[in-house]
Amino acid sequence: MMAQKQYAIPTGMIPAMLTPFDEQGELNVEVAEQLTERFIEAGVDGIFCLGTNGEFFAMSPEEKVRLIEVVSKKANGRIPIYAGTGGISTKETIELSLKMKELGVDALSVITPFFLPYTQEELKQHYTQLAEAVDLPIILYNIPGRAGVNLEPETVAELAKIPNIVGIKDSSGNFDLIKDYIRVTDDEFSVMAGNDSLILDTLIAGGKGAVAATSNVSPDWIVNLYANWKKGDNEEARIWQEKLNSLRGILDLGTLPSVFKACLQLLGIPVGEARQPVQPVSAEDRVKIEEVLKDIKEDARS
C-alpha cells in the first residue's frame, strides 16, 4: 500500500519554458539561465521544463538531465521546478523520473504514452506504476492532438485517488473536457489549462491555474491575468487573456515551437532555432510576428 501523504498541488501561472539551443544546436546554458531568471523576476508560480514547446521529443535523456541541472541551480529553491519525464514506455518514464528526483525537482509532468492507441486501462496502469516508483508529485499531461490518446474523465477520477498524482495539465483545447475533469475530482486535485486561450475560463470554472507557453514571450501578461482573477476582477483579467490570445493567433505561421522561438529572438533573447526537421519561420512571417510583438514592447517601455 502506498503511504498516505500530503503532496503540494500545482497552482497559479507556470511557464512552459522553451529549450534554448546555440548555433550548433546544443543546449545554450547561458540563455537557459536567462530565461529562468526572467520568469522568476516576473513573479510566476513555477517553471515547467521539457514540455511540448520545450522540445522534449527531440532531446536525449542526457540533454534533459543537463537542462534540469542548469535551471534548478539557477532557480536555487526560489521557485518550484517541474520536469517533463513522459515517454512511450513505462520503464523509460520511471527511469527518467527517478533521475529528476535525484536532481531535486519539485514535481513531474508526465505526458500520456504516445504513438500507440493505448486503452484507458493501460494508461491507468502506466501512471499507477510510475506513482508507486517515484515519490514525487505527478501532474498528468493530456494532449490528444499530439499523443493520439485522450485521458477520459473517469480515468482521471481514478488516478486522482493516488496520493502523489496531484493534477492534470489539459492541452486538448476542449473546455468541456476541462470542466469534466474539475467535476470528477475534488479540491485537492489541480486542473490546469494547457491551452493558453482557456486560462481564464478554466480559473472561473474551478481550475487552479495554467501551464502556459505564451509566457515565454510575455510572462508579465499571465501574471497580470492571474492577479486580476484572484482579486475578483474578471473584466480586467479578460483584457490580459485577449492579449495572450493574440499570441496564440500567430502559431500557425510555423511548426511548433518555431513561432515562439522567433518571438524571443525578436525580443532580443537568443533562444536559437527549433531542432530540425522544424524550420525557422520565413522572413515574411517574421514581419507579421513583429506586428504582434509591438504590444509587448510597448508594455516593457511603460
Image (cartoon, rainbow, N blue to C red):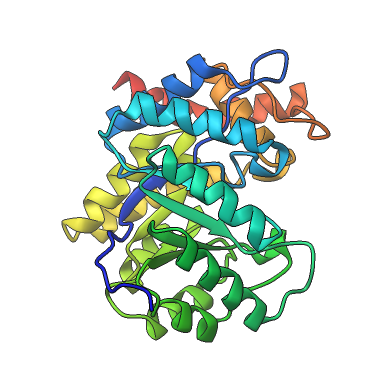
Above or below residue 123? Residue 48 is: above
Above or below residue 139? Residue 98 is: above
Which residue is the extreme one toward the left? 231
Residue 78 vs residue 156: left or right?
left
Q: Position of residue 135 (x, y in %)?
A: 39, 58
Which residue is the extreme one toward the front? 1
Above or below residue 9? Residue 155 is: below
Give the position of the C terminus as an image quadrant.
Answer: top left
In the foreground, 118 or 19? 118
Residue 152 vs residue 294: left or right?
right
Residue drawn at the location 63% of the way across and 83% of the way down: 121
How many badges with numbers are in the image? 0
- The reply to whether residue 162 is in sight is yes
Residue drawn at the location 46% of the way across and 68% of the way down: 132
In the foreground, 273 or 119? 119
In the foreground, 21 or 224? 21
Picture quarter containing residue 210?
A: bottom left
Give the position of the N terminus as an image quadrant.
Answer: bottom left
- The reply to whether residue 86 is in sight is no
Q: Position of residue 49 (x, y in %)?
A: 50, 40
Residue drawn at the location 25% of the way across and 33% of the way down: 78
In the foreground, 106 or 36? 106
Residue drawn at the location 30% of the way across and 56% of the way down: 11
Residue 76 vs residue 179: left or right?
left
Which residue is the extreme one toward the right? 277
Q: Position of residue 245 (x, y in %)?
A: 50, 49
Q: Position of residue 182 (x, y in %)?
A: 39, 77
